[in-house]
Image (tube, grey):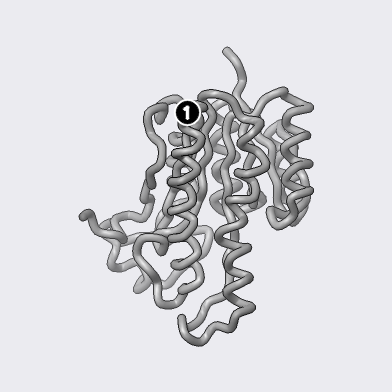
Amino acid sequence: MTTRVALLTAAGSGIGAAAARELAARGWRVALLSPSGRAERLAAELGGIGITGSYESGEDVVRLRDAALSGWGRIDALVCSAGHGPRGGVLDLPDADWHRALEVYFLSAMRPIRLVAPQMGEGGSIVAVTSYAAQQPAALYPTSSAMRAGLHAALKLVADELGPRGIRVNAVLPGFIDSIPQPPERYAGAALGRQGRVEEAARAIAFLCSEDASYVTGTTLRVDGGLARMP
């Protein structure tokens, strides 16, 4: 059986690191990128490739891509995660914060997709880890809400473009995950009434990367404990 290869950005901690562990546990090779040395340490633990760098640098993404191709000769999945950008009132944030949010929430996924997708073959999977705020705007995080909603529109276009090549494109929308502890009132409105665990988000990502999701593309998988109500 051919060993599959996944590239993960912002993979030094949180959901990205949990996804790397989950995929490795399922037999995947993982190549990890993060701005700290944590990706390298985690990759060493998992028998993968780790690079200290940023999704804001196309050169760093290319270094990760080329290292995976050189080491394993293929790329089967790309998982794009990102950190947190500015917060504040939607009419209060200056232009600089909106420009920063474009980088953190939108280009953090679109740049790796643009640089890695040409190297992927049939059966490949791209997963963007976004936020419940993409579909349920959060007043405290207007930049996240707006930029991620835009990202979802772009991902649908990417799914349409890559579909004929047999490459699937989907998004995972976490709610309040325990990598960032929140006071109970933040998630009290969720049907399950608790924060999610990074491992729960990671399993959703691994599912979308796997052949179990071979007919799933252009869609979103909410992992939010019922924070967003069913239509």
Q: Is residue 175 above or below residue 218?
A: below
Return the residue nearer the eye: 80 or 24: 80
Image quadrant containing the N terminus = top right
Q: Is residue 43 above or below residue 105?
A: above
Graded by Cα atoms within 10 Å as few (under 14), some (14 to 19) or many (20 or more), the crowding at tag 1 reads few
Seen in the image, is 48 located left or right of residue 166?
right
Seen in the image, is 28 located left or right of residue 219?
right
Q: Give x and y (percent) for residue 118.
A: 64, 34
Q: Which residue appears at 54% of the width and 83% of the height?
A: 93
Q: Give x and y (percent) for residue 96.
A: 64, 78
Q: Which residue appears at 35% of the width and 60% of the height?
A: 194
Q: Give x and y (percent) for residue 86.
A: 57, 74
Q: Residue furthest toward the left?
A: 231
Question: Residue 217 sits in which quadrant?
Answer: top left
Q: Is residue 115 above or below residue 77?
A: below
Label 1: which residue? Answer: 164
Q: Which residue appears at 50% of the width and 43% of the height?
A: 158
**Amino acid at circle 1:** Pro
Q: Residue furthest toward the bottom?
A: 92
